Amino acid sequence: MPDLTPTRPAPGTPVPLTYEQDWFHTKTRTDTWAHKNVRLSFEILGDLDVDALQAAVRAFVTRHDALHLQLPPEPGPHPEQWIRPVGAAEQLVQCQKVGAASPEQFSRYASALLSRDCVTPWQYGEQRPFTIRLLRYDTGRHALLATFQNLVFDGRAHHLFAHEVWRDYEALRRGDAVPDGAPSFAEAAVRQRAGTTPARRERALADWRERLGFLARNPWLRPDGATAAEGGRLQAELDARTTVALRRACEERRLSLLQWTVGTFVHALSRRTGRAEVGLWTSMDSRPSRDRDVVGMFAGSCPLTVVDAGGDPDAVRSRVRAQLLNALKHQRLTAEEITAVTREAEAQHGAPVGRDVYVNLRRFEGDYAGSRDTGPLRVTADAHELRRIAVTDIHALHLRCAEYRDRLLVGLRFDGQRVGRPLARTILDDVLAAARTAAQD
């Protein structure tokens, strides 16, 4: 069990940025990446206990110290962050009665407000790194909107918010106590930095140097015969029966379901394009098991390289598994070090290090549920879509996998000019066919 009452740095004491925070801050500061906030939204139908929901949100914010972090008003290239605890009288949820003419107009207003919050930069200094709103249409319809500055909040934190807030809401409605402590992000950040020895840093640099060189030598080129078309996204899912059976088959091969999926995708990509060597990037959650329930920013990207990608499928999956596990050991470089080793690889090979193929992996505890019944409520997640915000994907192929206990959701974005829909469709179909075959063995 993680320590829920760790010795945290005192308020005002400098807290080091995690390596992932350092990389994200550097990329956004230099305008290489666009600013973004992590967003959540819930449509709430039924008799909502507003006081209980506000108390549940306050409990979450109060016990997770990543949401107390502050940076100076004008953070430079090497900023310090520190903790400013939540005040007892501090308002954390902004409540608003919306005079909409219909539920549809109310929903459109919620989407517009969430969209504005999503792209609003964090005002460094005294502002909290989040905005949480509770909108009311009438007694039977509400919307909970939340945005968090990505510098302190990643995909795992996104999952923890949704899980813990509604768990605590139900507890408070029953009159039960809710947790007042949580694993400390500040302490986890200190441990991460302290665990980086010079020897580990040198191994990480050597590993990145090798992988980046591989990517520079193997740029993405549109395959012969690929039909250019408008870019888009393909989506598919494996149902509960197939997912459970496939997970069991993966365990026999000492693979996680997501490791198997990435390996199968790489093999399909190689077979359909004739590329024997495949380089790609993936997002990695660098939390060790003891910090699994830490809210904060520990998600970074890492290059993967696979040789003989079109060979024996099981061998390819094993190589991908080894690459993923090895990458976790090497998330210990600063932004300056990654930039330097990238430029070194590009100069050596005379070509840029591209991010043409990307995989994004997320694993959730519990069953998939677009909507859930919470007592007398019907709560639907992601009910309010962004409006008038264009999302540009720089990748030729972008695989997104979300694993639940009873389901595997797979999405594949593709660049119409560099890949085309027919090729993307064939690759995804190969992955799905291999999954169903493995589940039946």
Image (cartoon, rainbow, N blue to C red):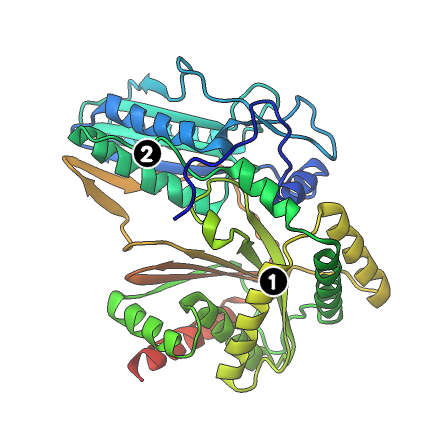
The x and y percentages for residue 211 are 70, 66
In this rendering, would 215 be left or right of 52?
Answer: right
Residue at 74% x, 59% y is: 199
The x and y percentages for residue 134 are 33, 25
Judged from the image, the secondary structure of the residue bearing numbered disc 1 is helix
Name the residue that disc number 2 marks.
179
Quarter of the figure with residue 226: bottom right
Badge 1: how crowded within 10 Å, few (<14), some, or many (20+)? many
Residue at 72% x, 70% y is: 214
Quarter of the figure with residue 306: bottom right
In this rendering, would 341 be left or right of 211?
Answer: right
Between residues 96 and 73, which one lies in front from this camera angle? 73
Instruction: State how far apart marks 1 and 2 are (Cα).
Output: 34 Å
Q: Which mark is on residue 61?
A: none
The answer to whether residue 434 is above or below residue 418 is below
Quarter of the figure with residue 435: bottom left
Farthest-out residue, top: 89
Residue at 63% x, 55% y is: 331
Residue at 20% x, 27% y is: 48
The answer to whether residue 48 is above or below residue 302 is above
Disc 1 to disc 2: CB gap under 8 Å: no
Q: Is residue 226 visible?
A: yes
The answer to whether residue 263 is above or below residue 293 is below
Q: Is residue 357 visible?
A: no
The x and y percentages for residue 262 are 49, 69
Between residues 68 and 355, which one lies in front from this camera angle? 68
In this rendering, would 115 be left or right of 407?
Answer: right
The x and y percentages for residue 164 are 33, 39
- Work out whether mark 1 precedes mark 2 in sequence or the reverse, and give the earlier one: 2
Q: Which mark is on residue 327?
A: 1
The amino acid type, in three-letter code, at marker 2 is: Pro
